[in-house]
Every structure is written in C-alpha cells, then in structure tokens.
Image (spheres, rainbow, N blue to C red):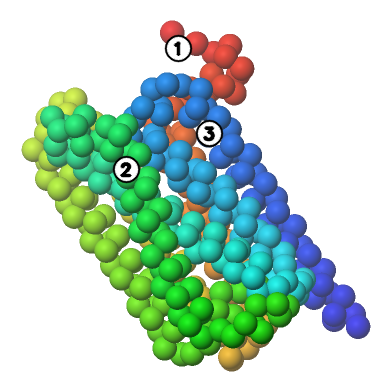
Amino acid sequence: MAANDSSVYKINEKVILVQVVVALFLCINIVLITTFFRKDFFYTTMRYILFAVTLMSDCLFLLVTDIVLILSYFRFTIQIWLCLFIYVVLSVYTFVTPVALTAMVLERNVAICMPLRHGELCSTRSARHCILIIHSISSLPCIAVLSMFFASATYSFYPQGRVCSVEIFVFHAWQGHLRSAINQLFFLMMCITIVFSYVKIMKVAKAASGQDRKSTGRGLRTVALHAFQLLLCCIQLWCPFIENALLRINFKLYVEIRFFDYIMFYLAPRCLSPLIYGLRDDMFFLALKSSALCGLYKKR
C-alpha cells in the first residue's frame, strides 16, 4: 500500500510540474500574441505573421496535450468520438509548428538571398496563402490515419470508453507502419529544406561585407535556431513508436520515457519560439518591453 501511495505521489508531482511549465509558457505566449496584434507593422510582415501562427498553434497544442496527459495519467476513460476530436486537433497542430518553422526559414532565405524580390514573394497576401498551405499540409497525416481508421472501425466501436491515445486508432501493424512512413517523409522534407536554406544563406554570408555581413550572420543564426527547434519537433514524430516498443517490454519504463519525451520533445521546442523572436528580434523586443511597461517605455 505504501508503494502505491508513493507511486501516486510521484505521478502527482510530475503532473504538477507539467502544469506549472504549461501555465508559464501559455502566459508568455499570450503576452507575445497580444504584443503582435498591438502593432500594425507586425501583422503586415510575413515573418511576424508566421511567428504569430506558431505561437497560437503552440498555445492550442500545449493546452490539449496537457488535458490528454492528465486523462492518461489518471486513467480517465472517454468515448471514442470525443477522443477522435482531440486526436484531430493534436494531429494537425503537431505538424503546424514544424511546417510553419520551415516556412519561416524559407522566408529568411528569400530575405537574405533574394532581397529585391522579398517584398513581392513575402507580401501580406502571400502570408495568408502560406497559412492555408501550412494547415493543409499539416492535415495530410491526420487524413491518412483517419481514413485507415474509418475503413477498419465498426459502428459499435465509437460509443466505447477508452483512455485517449493515438494507438486506439491503429488496428493493424501496417497502419502503424504507414503512419511512421508519413512522419519520416515529413521529417526528411523539412530537413532538406533547412539544409538547403542554411547552405544558401552561408554562401551569401561569406560573400557579404560590412553591415550586410552582420545582417546575414544574424539571419544565419536565426535559421540555425529554427533548425534546432525543428529537430526537436521532428524527434517528437518518432516518440510514439519508441514508446510502443517500450510498452511491450516494461510498463514502468514506458511511463518514465513518455513523461521525458513529453517534456523534451513536446514542450521544449514550443517554448523556444518566444526566445527566438520574442527576445532576439530587436523590433519585437522593444514592442514587448513597451507592452510590459504598459506603454511607459519609449524608444529614445
């Protein structure tokens, strides 16, 4: 009995830790989103629009994953149709952030390597189209998994109560393999885009001089940070397969690794966005400082 009490205590301790982290970064993201909407310049500039998309995507993702974490840790069961709705939101917004980050890298590539065409290619209208494309691409894995699920599930399956998890939508081994292949394809395409952009910007950085070199070097560092953030997001796509393998071997180890994966590959990359643009970008930082001081701060 004492061992069980200790286990419950540890689980509660972990859940409380996650609540603190999620609440902290939700507050930070909300402040950044509020700052974004206070300045006309931000929502007429493509890179800031994409930044706002990642912030809003991260807020929704953090909130829903936190709910699922609580439900799974305390073994709450919900009907399949409700879990299906949660899965759709999580599946789409799992990919929105990495795809948006890839788009931000391409925007920096255009800004540095094709500055004369930047205004044309990265206009506000293009940003709106880009948001639609980001969400369309991010929906493809979800459509593929749900198509396989609807083809396999019977009507009696939907009212059943289960602990909500993506695994309940996979009935056959080949479905899991196909889901894995789709994730790997996304990972490969995003990596190729990042490497291609980084190499092109590096070439421009070597050829630049003076102020241009400084600006290009800053863009190169931004791309590198995005690459690191994107790597963490992409590793997240592998987590379910590693966790499933551990579940068959050792349940206790599965619980520990799942919690580690959640912190490291689900929360951490979504906590980097405020640092990359919220603090490193001079213009956004000044606007953020002004908002934090309720407009008392003015640039001198």
In the image, residue 33 above or below residue 220: above
Q: Kindly identify the residue that appears in the image at 71 percent across and 80 percent down.
A: 160
Packing grade of label 1 (10 A; few <14, some 14-19, many >=20) is few
Marks 2/3 in contact by CB < 8 Å: the verdict is no
Residue 104 position within the rendered picture, expressed as x and y whole percent measured from the top left: 32, 44
Q: Earlier in the sequence, mark 2 or mark 3?
A: 3
Residue 256 position within the rendered picture, expressed as x and y whole percent measured from the top left: 64, 75
Nearer to us in this view, 105 or 16: 105
Query: Which residue is label 2 attached to?
Result: 129
Task: Using residue 150 as the reference point, say whether residue 82 is left or right of it.
Answer: right
Q: Secondary structure at mark 3?
A: helix
Residue 223 position within the rendered picture, expressed as x and y whole percent measured from the top left: 30, 46
Q: Quadrant of the N terminus?
A: bottom right
**Any mark on residue 32, and which?**
3
Q: Earlier in the sequence, mark 3 or mark 1?
A: 3
Packing grade of label 2 (10 A; few <14, some 14-19, many >=20) is few
Q: Where is residue 158, by image quadrant? A: bottom right
Residue 39 position within the rendered picture, expressed as x and y whole percent measured from the top left: 46, 21
Which amino acid does the dot numbered 2 rest on?
A: His
Query: Which residue is label 1 attached to?
Result: 299
Separation of marks 3 and 1 at Cα, in angstroms? 19 Å
Outermost residue toward the left in this view: 207
Which amino acid does the dot numbered 3 rest on?
A: Leu
Q: Kindly identify the residue that appears in the image at 85 percent across and 80 percent down.
A: 4
Q: Where is residue 165, by image quadrant? A: bottom right
Task: Using residue 289 as the reference point, say whether residue 73 is left or right of it.
Answer: right
In the image, residue 167 above or below residue 43: below
Separation of marks 2 and 1 at Cα, in angstroms? 34 Å
